[in-house]
Amino acid sequence: MFKSASKSNLEGEFQCKISLLDDTELSCDFKRDVKGQTVFDEVCRTLDLLEKDYFGLRYVDDAKQRHWLDLNKSVVRQMKTLKPPYKLFFRVKFYSVDPSTLHEEITRYQFFLQVKRDILHGRLLCTFNDLVELGAYIVQADIGDYEEEDHGENYVSEFRIVPKQSDKLEKKIAETHKMLTGQVPAVAEKNFLGAVKGLDMYGVDPHPCKDQDNVQLYLGLTPVGIAIIREGKKVSGFNWPEVLKCSYEGKVFYVQVQKEDRKANYGFRLPDPLACKHLWKCAVEHLAFYSHKDNVAKPKRKAISPQRFFRRSKHKYLGPTQDQLIAESEKISRPAPEIKRAPSVRISRRIKVSSDSISESTGVLNLSSPGQSGGNTPISDATVLEKFETSKFPPSPPPDDSFVGDSTDASSPSVANHVGHEEKPATKVVTKPTPSHVEVENYGFKMFIFIMFILALIMIPIAIVWETRKTYIKSTDAYKGFAKFVLKSFGYKI
């Protein structure tokens, strides 16, 4: 199925290029009905990955939005707005809470490539001191121990570790690297992952949103929960154990959280309904993956009803939880597969940049000071959360490909009444919202279709039986005699 990226002898109906974490490419050709799981399994087989459930395939649609490929659906149907050859990206989908403890070295190497990529692209923001340590591990994993004859004095300037890096940062990385003598690539990569797991922004999947003051924020899905991010820092959020469920309606994404004495609902306004739906799907999968609960037995089937027959869309995560994946990984017993490590991004000459002209970090955002960015620190900023608290929580997301109130503007009363400051009710009782005219109209139409479907199921067998009996009657002697009598009475000669 897969061929080297340098070959163009593709025989399949559809062509696809798959970019790996080391920036190499695989070429793939497949038929129209092939599902995402088949393509994903072939990528993992090529990489010799057994702990594959941490990873996924992404694609970018024509609106420049990133989506995870649904492994249970046809690849072609998901990318129908795009033209072949399709472009897919193999990436880490679920970041391990402690990636340094991953069972196989080859899995840790893929995580190392992903986190190194996050730093280079400015996605993982960290302080200057953190960058020095992480950069030293990157250099050690790439070139090994420092040798003055081979590397010289300004050797770190060849490495692209952050989007912008100064002389000061490179000198500190070189000083630290020289103290890592004896660490082979596997050890340096493991130490790198051990150092990065405690950073606030480790494993963040950011989704843009705004508060009632139109301030730009991000909702980040992380290994420990949902983070509210402002100016590159976590300002509040929810840990996965306290998140009960997620939903969305129009442009608003809702989270229901279990507090000490009550259930609280929070709403966040996103740019458009499609972005909201994408965040909801990702949140449902993250909530299930990081859950510590065992799989619950499926409830018994209930009697057919119009509500159940035309139930609203649901998205479920069908893979293992992190705990189950760790347990399964412990059972792996095979010789360590060979790893072909790719060199880090290099340049022949670094453009000289004054240390005072850039931030001593991965970006220009305000970051917490060293020693204050602990991934295990409880998130408790009640002031921030109060801005998003709401009494509303949709019972279930709207049907696929249809959004009630898509044209509602972010400043319209219907959204503003649910997101932002509002008067707290006198009691804790949450009233069920009255269905809109559109919802009632849709329900009536669905009810009509349901009744017609039931009538068709009843009438079709009756019609078949009647036609069969009529054919039988025509073949009897009594029917033939009666037919002759009628014809003779009208003067016809037989």
Image: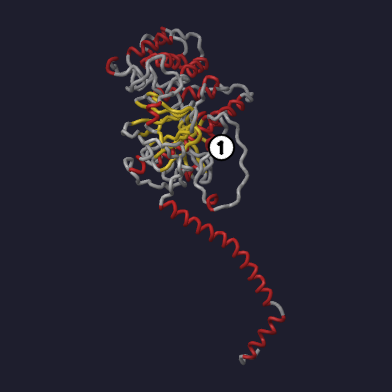
Residue 470 seen from this side: yes
Q: Residues within 10 Å of mark 1 (few under 14, many from 20)?
A: few
Up-down relation of residue 347 to residue 424 (above or below): above
- Vertical side of 120 occupied by 17: above or below: below
Residue drawn at point x = 57 percent, y = 59 percent: 454
The front one of 429 and 267 is 429
Instruction: Establish if 391 lies above or below 334.
Output: below
The part of the image, by quadrant, that contains residue 331 is top right
Residue 399's x, y, as percent? 47, 47
Taking the image as drawn, is residue 87 in sight?
A: no
> In the picture, which quadrant includes the N terminus?
top right
Query: Which percent across, then down, holds residue 334?
Result: 63, 23
Q: Quadrant of the C terminus?
A: bottom right
Can you name the residue that lies furthest to the front here?
426
Q: Is residue 152 left or right of residue 39?
A: left
**Which residue, given by chain and number where applicable, does mark 1 sit on?**
318
Number of callouts: 1
**Residue at position x 42%, y 25% from top?**
118
Give the image's coloring scheme: secondary structure
* Spot occupied by residue 262 in the image (x, y as percentages of width and height): 49, 32
- As drawn, is 477 to the left or to the right of 215? right
Q: Quick check: 1 left or right of 280?
A: right
Name the foreground residue: 212 vs 192: 212
Return the x and y of residue 111 as percentages of the image width and height.
49, 24
Q: What residue sits 37% from the left and 18% below the top?
A: 368
Residue type at numbered disc 1: Leu
Residue 423 to residue 106: above or below: below
Name, please, the residue furthest toward the bottom. 491
Element type at mark 1: loop
